[in-house]
Structure formats: C-alpha cells, structure tokens
Amino acid sequence: MDQFAQNGFRLEQCAIAARAMKIDPVDFLPSIHLVQNGYVSIIAYQTRGYAYLPMD
C-alpha cells in the first residue's frame, strides 16, 4: 500500500462502509484516506475527467 501511495495513488476508504462493517478508522493504514462517502468521492473524480472502471 505504501508503494502505491509513493507512486502517486490516492487510496480511499468510505467511512459509511467502515461504520457498517464496524471498523474503527484508527485501524486503517496511514496511507489510506478516509472519505465521508465513497460514492460522492467517485462522482467528484468523474467530474475531473477520471473514469470509473468496475472490477467485479
């Protein structure tokens, strides 16, 4: 994870999902940014020209 961060990747975790799974934010690695809403974050990236590529 640190190598991704060092190479310019921003790793984000949705706070809503973390709460639903009962994961305390302090348990995430320091290189992972907690965002309030993952969907809103994705929309913000799309408005800046990034594409959403589902991986399922």
Image (spheres, grey):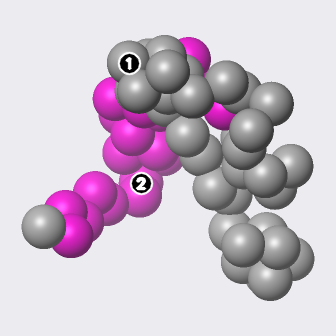
Question: Going by the image, does 30 lie left or right of 23?
Answer: right
In this view, the residue in front, 52 or 29, is: 29
Reading the image, the residue beneath label 2 is 49
How many labels sit on residues?
Answer: 2
Question: Going by the image, does 40 lie left or right of 55?
Answer: right
Element assignment for label 1: helix
Q: Quadrant of residue 6?
A: bottom right
The furthest residue to the front: 22
Residue depicted at 78% across the width and 52% down the height: 29
Question: Going by the image, does 15 lie left or right of 42?
Answer: right
Residue depicted at 80% across the width and 30% down the height: 26
Horizontal and vertical percent position of residue 51: 31, 60
Residue type of the residue flagged with mark 1: Ala
26, above or below 3, in the image: above
Query: Which of marks 1 and 2 precedes in the sequence?
Result: 1
Location of the C terminus by quadrant is: bottom left
Residue type of the residue flagged with mark 2: Gly
Q: Which residues are magenta?
A: 34-55
Reading the image, the residue beneath label 1 is 20
Residue depicted at 38% across the width and 18% down the height: 20
The furthest residue to the left: 56
33, above or below 52, in the image: above
Disc 2 crowd rating (10 Å Cα; few below 14, some 14-19, many 20+) is few
Q: CA distance from mark 2 to mark 1?
A: 30 Å
Location of the N terminus by quadrant is: bottom right
Nearer to us: label 2 or label 1: 1
Residue 55 badge:
none
Disc 1 crowd rating (10 Å Cα; few below 14, some 14-19, many 20+) is few
5, above or below 41, in the image: below
53, above or below 7, in the image: above
Q: Is residue 47 magenta?
A: yes
